[in-house]
Image: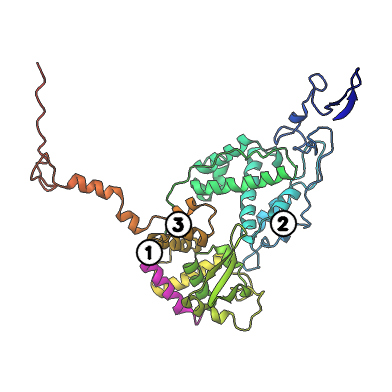
Amino acid sequence: MTGKQTDRGEDVLVPTTVWRPGASTTHPAAATTVAGSGGYGGGALGPLGRTGEPPLPPPSPLVASVGDIAGLRPRRRRRDGGEVPGADVDLIDALPRHDDPATHQRAGWPTVAAWLRAGKTAATRRDRLAVVAKFVRWWALTAPGAGLWQVTEDVVVAYLDQLGTGSGPAAELNRGGKALAPATLAWHLSNLKSLYGYAARRQVIGHSPAQWVEAPEVGKVGTTPALDLTEGTTLLRGAQTIAAKHPADAAAVALLTITGMRAGELESLTVGRIERSAGHWVIRFRLKGGAVIVVPLPEVTMALLRPLLTGRKPGDLLLQRADGRSFDRWRQQTALRRAARAAGLDTAKLTPHMLRATAATLLLAMGVAVEKVQALLGHASPVTTQRYDRGETRLDEHAVHRLADLLTQQSPAAPGWSVDDPAGPQLPKPSPAPK
């Protein structure tokens, strides 16, 4: 505002930033360029929302390749120490690195690389890379030559629809061409919202095309299978059996079984994360979202961990392969199968996430409060935790049993009838219709 005097000498304030009809063809509030509009990728959005100003410089992740980011070392051949598919790294590294004024496209690589590096854990960065690489492949098949920042809300909706139905170009990217489950679709959408939200915050685009896309309805009961109590106990005994020959495998199985931690959380554990506190052995580890929790370690677990602590530095990885590489989810699966075979259990489909589901299911079946199980598993919402509430106790109390009892019990309208009576229930005859 500026000061101005009227004809009578009175001082008044006159607004100077109000858009007035006829003063310009574009209202300042409408000057934001949206993703996919053909504008400069949203880069024309200035600090005050006016057009005509140069775009902000793109993010600068300070790496030459996304493969240089911790946790994203490319895998080129078996046992080369790689952590993610080299093809995914090469695909992202091939994205444009500089703005192209001729096509009004902003660079894609700097923003994607910065977003990947901003992930709080290696597991988060790997999830992000897998999602964005799959989306980039699909977008190249769907709209060859189109940039990552030309994506619209309708494009995101179409992508999820194809993933969920196993149709279109997405069918070529799904394993076996199968449709993805709602929970997996929600995971893809969550990562895309994170990517485009990050790009919007860094003013690479004007708004996120994924912001208002609705997540698919996820069932209240999880689909990941879980071991029952007897199987869980047997697997833990199998871990004790292989401890002398495979100490790291035994420790991995014990930690996965008793703490329910994620594979990525187990992989990143260091020796210094295990310590004494208030008379207990505890383990401190970082959850998927970045928070650090403290979990006590019972003696059955510590007995398997002690051989891994002796003579080692706090910063050393707790679990390592024989060649020094990290104990990733694939190596963890090998450990589970070794323990299962030693215990005489079926090793088919045994995964680290299955033990996470087992921990949650058993605790909830025992009546442990959802809030406590949620805190252990690091779920952001108790709704996620409740999806594991599907134990045998809940099935025993299911309403269908009560209905079956009602239908098969003695009927008041047919005294003496039972389900074994071939004649069936003798229902009362209807009253004659009035004449």
Residue drawn at point x = 65 percent, y = 75 percent: 316
Residue picked out by circle 1: 228
Residue type marked 1 = Asp
Q: Quadrant of the N terminus?
A: top right
Left or right: 430, with 19 as reference point: left
Q: Quadrant of the C terminus?
A: top left
Q: Earlier in the sequence, mark 1 or mark 3?
A: 1
Residue picked out by circle 2: 66
Residue drawn at point x = 54 percent, y = 76 percent: 281
Real-space CA distance between mark 1 and mark 3, rounded to the nearest whole angstrom: 19 Å
Comparing marks 1 and 2, which lies closer to the viewer? 1
Q: Nearer the viewer, residue 276 or 147?
A: 276
Please indicate, yes or no, whether residue 349 appears anywhere in the rendered image. no
Residue drawn at point x = 41 percent, y = 59 percent: 364
Real-space CA distance between mark 1 and mark 2, rounded to the nearest whole angstrom: 41 Å
Q: Quadrant of residue 346?
A: bottom left
